[in-house]
Amino acid sequence: MFVYTECMLRFRTAMLFLLGLTSSVCAQYTLTDFILWDYRDTSPGTITLPKYHEWLGSYCQGNPPPRLILYITDPCNPDPDSTQGWLKFYDPTAGVTDADGNLTFVGFLKQLQPHVSDVELLIDLTSFSASVTPNPSNSCWGGSPSGSSLEPAWLPSAFSRLPNTMGWLEALMQNVHLQNANPVQAFALDPEGSGGAPEYINIMLWLDKYKATTASPQVQALDISMTLAFEAHNLVKNCVAELPTPLASGSNWPASLWANMQANSGVANYYAQIQQGNGFLPWRTTTDSLLQRAYLQVYSACIAQRTPGSETSEFWRFAATSSDCDCNETATYTVQSGASVASNLVDVMQRTPAACGKGTIEASVSNQAVTLSGTNSIMPFMEGYTRLFLDGSSGPIPSSGVWKYMASDPPVADTAHVTGQIESSAGHSLPYTYTEISIDFRAPEMTDNSPDRIILMFSAEKNGLLPFFGWGTPSDFYSFITNFYASTQATTDATTVYMGGSGGLPVPHNRFGLYDLKQLCDNWGIGQYGTVICPGDGTLDGIVNLADILHAISFWGTSEQTADHNGDGIIGVQDLLVIVHSWGDC
């Protein structure tokens, strides 16, 4: 018996070791692991809509993302000089090509489906603009709005044309060419500009009621998603929690989440509807959450001009560093190591200071009260309820815990009174570490199924006021996500960031997103964004013409790669012959 037990223990140990290796391997991220956003930044413009989507389809075939969020535009948008081609491309009733043989949006989706099985169609306040004329009622393609009489008061003016959007979406989802060949799984909104949290909630409620009472089966089946600031985690937890709430039996809502809904003015209309529905929504008794997919932007841009007494709302220092821990138009940045960024983000989500601030701060004590006096510091712009400590040569000050700035607005002057351990910096003005955004992601708790509906979205942007992951390399980003994922799996560990009603919840492996495809191409060298490469097109504008001949002549006798069309390493007559042979559109 002893021998058998020892063998079994050895076998069990070996299996656990192998499982550990497998888990480690699974956590190594690559580009195709990330949900990808594409805002179609250069089209129409330097490239036509059909050509751009040909390029996008080719990109997705070679680098298929698990989910693609795809920006769309109203086909009835004004096209005064007939160069943008909105109607030809986005007509939801079109075939796979238009009358000229060019790819349509319908054709693009059909071609994309074998490579990307989950596509979200994204709109913002300009996609189906309230100011669009003529044809504000979809008549440009022979359609009509859908849901016009449905709770119009819930729609903020910036999204008053949602019935037009729904009419377009209904026609697209029922297009005969897309039956059994349609990758669209969700409808997404970027609500920026609509007003704030109460308006976001009203848009969600409108869409939920539309799906339940008006939509066709094809649109009913779609998820609803929205992109929101990282700080909006309280609103998001309310909206991604499955129904019913505790007003009905069988609720999975933690007590802290229910208390937050009742006290949160931003979700007041949702709470009012839940009360009417006795724990559900008045128009349905299904358990679906109000929002099926929530994208939290784990970044916020630098502010070029700050106003003392006004919060900066910046959020980038957890990832990038600069020489003065600050930003301006000419600054350069370094993305920190993957392990450091991961540790910093865990700290951010636990409301632990993780960001270095510009300038220095001195702490003085008088009458058992601590006063902080800054020198060119970030204090006049800090968010309310900031936590911080000074970086002393022998360790942090205070030596235990952190100081808390408890006012709801930052001080106008470079001085603040804080609570916490009574301790001074002995007359020295020191560097400091603070909470760039003041949140505790663990409170309130979420339902146990909510993590699958929350996607943490990161930016690959890069300039003086956008110091995000574009300043690093793809490997830097993959290392960060790998480390962050690994550190957030232990549900009773100090690095837990998602909390459910019965304890910690692991962050899912596949709920990370990247903004956006243009930034990846431009800053990480992933590919040449929106460019259809064709023989002879040295200017890379999608057409072979006189400009390409002049381009080749300007590099005559050199080895310029963009003009070396026959690949012999020198620009000459043979390259001109390739241009002439390829004359016209790519």
Image (spheres, grey):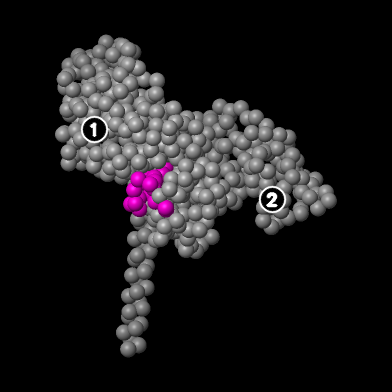
Q: Position of residue 343 (x, y in %)?
A: 52, 52
* Type of the residue with mark 1: Leu
Residue picked out by circle 1: 172
Mark 2 secondary-structure assignment:
strand
Badge 1 marks a residue whose secondary structure is: helix
Q: Quadrant of residue 540?
A: top left
User: Where residue 444 sits: x, y (%)?
Assistant: 52, 53
Rendered residue at 38%/58% (across/down):
24
Q: Residues within 10 Å of mark 2 (few under 14, many from 20)?
A: many
Q: Quadrant of residue 314?
A: top right
Mark 1 surroundings: few (<14), some (14-19) or many (≥20) residues within 10 A: many
Mark 1 or mark 2, which has the lower sequence index? 1
Residue 129, percent from left and from top: 38, 24
Q: Quadrant of the C terminus?
A: top left
Horizontal relation, residue 487 to residue 312: left or right: left
In depth, the one of 232 and 62 nearer the eye is 232
Q: Nearer the viewer, residue 331 or 449?
A: 449
Q: Measure the alpha-carbon separation of dots 1 and 2.
A: 55 Å
- Of residues 238 and 89, which is closer to you in this image? 238
Judged by depth in the image, the label closer to the viewer, 1 or 2, is 1
Q: Is residue 347 above or below residue 77?
A: below
Q: Amino acid at mark 2?
A: Trp
Residue 279 lies within the magenta run = yes
**Picture residue at 16% right of the left edge, 34% below the top:** 176
* Residue underneath mark 2: 403
Give the magenta range: 278-295
Task: Count all numbered tags in the image, as a single digit.
Answer: 2
Point out the image quarter for the N terminus: bottom left
The front one of 433 and 278 is: 278
Q: Indicate yes or no whether the magenta region holds residue 209.
A: no
Image: 3 above or below 408 = below
